[in-house]
Image (tube, helix red, strand yellow):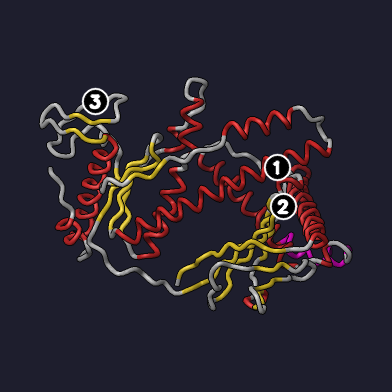
């Protein structure tokens, strides 16, 4: 059994949207009051307030505030307390690891976008003549029209996400794992900036481009407005909506590309890049960092990893060192510089430098996976090694 998440855009009335914003404000106050309770207990009495202490105190708060907390589903309020607990767990983990701890902060309403409903019931999602509908206690009715039917499995998580002028609902179901048929083909993937990715088959994935002139124009319009004015808020929402639409479009494009790679190949080899370390802050690399992060290598890698596990494919991360300098045919090391053409001085090979790097990544992935699986038992590695033709 595996978990799969369905994200659906919710249809909600204007009055329902106002009601949802009011619920967000109530839950945000609950989060901040719970944080203040923990903070004061430690500073004044050096006493730790646990999650279960606050869950027990939630009943008293609901009884004393029937028009506020008492009118909302208790599972949504528990979700806010669980979120605060996760923030403190991350704080203690960073303290033990010697990292910058970052004590949990009080949240403004603008940062309260998601509402988690813990332990949801499958009956919360009701089927209608057209689509579905959800309505937890105290919430407005949210209609859902997914592009594919929702599964009959058990509902494990429910999240309501408030975006600029939109509402999304994330439904996580527990379903049976259905792996793809075994496939003997393999692919290596070289990530880049001029091209988002190049496959060892020669296929190219074009780079993600953002509408920077329009973004800067919207930012200048915001800068001309007086702080706190309604016009500024309206233009900020417009810019946020534009950026969100760009993000959704890019994420969907990544889904289409990664799904196609998973369907066609039994082994996927990618570079193990330290993306956070590569995108260091600095004036000299400001433009390079921006372009690097806009390609979203981490998103591609994460999608390939979990989809490979879902489909029963092999996913391998290899050391990227010298993959762009070594010749995949003879193994000689050359420095291509800034040229997009790789020229080997030993065997006179000439080809696209990213394609050559993808072939080196594929070879390293097949060898790394083969060494592990020969010791553990049979797998698809012999078929992969026989199918992949590398000129070594």
**Residue depicted at x 12% and y 30%:** 348
Q: Say above or below: 71 vs 245.
A: below
Of helix, strand and loop, which one carries label 1? helix
Q: Say above or below: 381 vs 101.
A: below
To which residue does mark 3 refer? 335
Q: Quadrant of residue 204?
A: top left
The stretch of residues the image draws in magenta is: 53-65
Mark before the other along the chain sequence, 1 or 3: 1
Mark before the other along the chain sequence, 2 or 1: 2
To which residue does mark 2 refer? 165
Instruction: Please identify the quadrant where the C terminus is shown.
Output: top left
Disc 3 versus disc 2: nearer the observer = 2
Marking on residue 238: 1
Of helix, strand and loop, which one carries label 3? loop
Q: Nearer the viewer, residue 51 or 114?
A: 114
Q: Say above or below: 165 vs 66.
A: above
**Residue depicted at x 78% and y 66%:** 140
């Amino acid at each position: 059994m595996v978990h799969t998440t369905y994200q659906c855009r919710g249809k909600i009335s204007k009055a329902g949207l106002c009601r949802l914003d009011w619920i967000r404000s109530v839950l945000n106050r609950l989060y901040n009051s719970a944080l203040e309770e923990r903070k004061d207990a430690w500073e004044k009495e050096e006493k730790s307030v646990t999650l279960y202490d606050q869950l027990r105190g939630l009943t008293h708060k609901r009884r004393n505030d029937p028009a506020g907390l008492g009118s909302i589903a208790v599972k949504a309020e528990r979700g806010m307390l669980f979120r605060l607990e996760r923030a403190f767990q991350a704080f203690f983990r960073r303290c033990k690891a010697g990292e910058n701890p970052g004590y949990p902060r009080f949240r403004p309403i603008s940062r309260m976008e998601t509402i988690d409903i813990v332990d949801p019931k499958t009956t919360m999602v009701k089927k209608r003549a057209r689509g579905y509908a959800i309505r937890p206690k105290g919430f407005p009715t949210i209609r859902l029209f997914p592009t594919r039917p929702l599964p009959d499995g058990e509902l494990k998580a429910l999240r309501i996400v408030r975006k600029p002028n939109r509402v999304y609902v994330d439904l996580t179901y527990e379903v049976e794992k259905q792996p793809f048929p075994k496939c003997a083909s393999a692919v290596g993937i070289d990530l880049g900036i001029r091209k988002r990715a190049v496959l060892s088959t020669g296929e190219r994935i074009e780079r993600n481009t953002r509408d920077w002139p329009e973004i800067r124009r919207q930012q200048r319009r915001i800068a001309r407005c007086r702080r706190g004015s309604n016009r500024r808020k309206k233009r900020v929402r417009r810019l946020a909506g534009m950026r969100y639409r760009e993000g959704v479009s890019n994420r969907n494009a990544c889904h289409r590309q990664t799904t196609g790679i998973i369907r066609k190949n039994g082994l996927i080899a990618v570079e193990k890049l330290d993306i956070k370390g590569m995108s260091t802050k600095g004036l000299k690399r400001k433009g390079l960092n921006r372009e690097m992060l806009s390609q979203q290598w981490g998103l591609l890698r994460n999608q390939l990893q979990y989809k490979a596990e879902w489909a029963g494919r092999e996913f391998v991360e290899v050391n990227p060192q010298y993959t762009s300098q070594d010749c995949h045919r003879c193994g000689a090391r050359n420095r291509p510089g800034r040229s997009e053409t790789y020229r080997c001085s030993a065997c006179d090979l000439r080809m696209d430098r990213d394609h050559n790097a993808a072939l080196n990544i594929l070879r390293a992935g097949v060898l790394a996976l083969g060494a592990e699986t020969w010791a553990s038992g049979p797998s698809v590695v012999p078929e992969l090694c026989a199918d992949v033709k590398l000129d070594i």
